[in-house]
Amino acid sequence: MNAYEKIYETVRKIPKGKVSTYGDIARFSGNPHWARVVGYAMYSCDSSMGLPCHRVLNRLGETCPGHLFGGENVQRGRLEAEGVKFENGRVDLGVYGWNGLEDYEN
């Protein structure tokens, strides 16, 4: 299994209403130095893959640039629809952060 496949397998597990960071996805995928690789993998991801990529945020709990999800605030809107709350443009990772153990259910 290559790096992207490991990353996609990990992202697939993020439960509805939870988020993760590039760095945590890297760690959960087996290499804590892969944060940039996770970013490239998310950028390369095709919507037909059915991955919940909108649940991956930067280390500060901020969303990705608008063009990655088809427009400004699309990622935020998808997260809010799942019950994730934003304060000052950020998600509280202590509240909504995924611990890498729970599996995606929806």
Image (cartoon, rainbow, N blue to C red):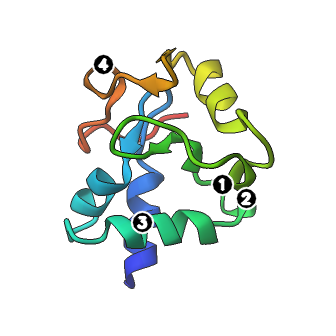
Horizontal and vertical percent for residue 28?
A: 24, 57
Crowding at label 3, few (<14), some or many (≥20) Cα neighbours within 10 Å? Answer: many
The residue to which callout 4 is attached is 95
Q: In the visual, does 6 lie left or right of 24?
A: right
Q: Is residue 61 visible?
A: yes
Q: Nearer the viewer, mark 3 or mark 1?
A: 3
Residue at the location (25% across, 23% down)? Answer: 94
Residue furthest to the bottom in view is: 2
Residue kind at label 3, given as amino acid type: Val
Residue 69 numbered tag: none
Alpha carbon distance from label 3 to label 4: 22 Å
Q: Which callout, 2 or 3, points at the residue further toward the start of the chain?
A: 3
| Relative vertical location of residue 74 with respect to residue 36 in this rendering, above or below | above
The residue to which callout 2 is attached is 47
| Relative vertical location of residue 47 with respect to residue 76 in this rendering, above or below | below
Horizontal and vertical percent for residue 51?
A: 59, 54
Residue kind at label 2, given as amino acid type: Ser
Crowding at label 1, few (<14), some or many (≥20) Cα neighbours within 10 Å? Answer: few
Alpha carbon distance from label 1 to label 2: 6 Å
Alpha carbon distance from label 1 to label 4: 25 Å
Residue 11: quarter of image? bottom left
Q: Quadrant of the N terminus?
A: bottom left
Q: Secondary structure at mark 1?
A: loop
Horizontal and vertical percent for residue 38?
A: 42, 66
Alpha carbon distance from label 2 to label 3: 16 Å
Task: Compare residues 99 and 77 and report the one nearer the observer.
Answer: 77
| Relative vertical location of residue 29 with respect to residue 61 in this rendering, above or below | below
The residue to which callout 3 is attached is 38
The residue to which callout 1 is attached is 50
Horizontal and vertical percent for residue 19?
A: 42, 36
Alpha carbon distance from label 3 to label 1: 16 Å
Question: Circles 3 and 1: CB distance less than 8 Å?
Answer: no
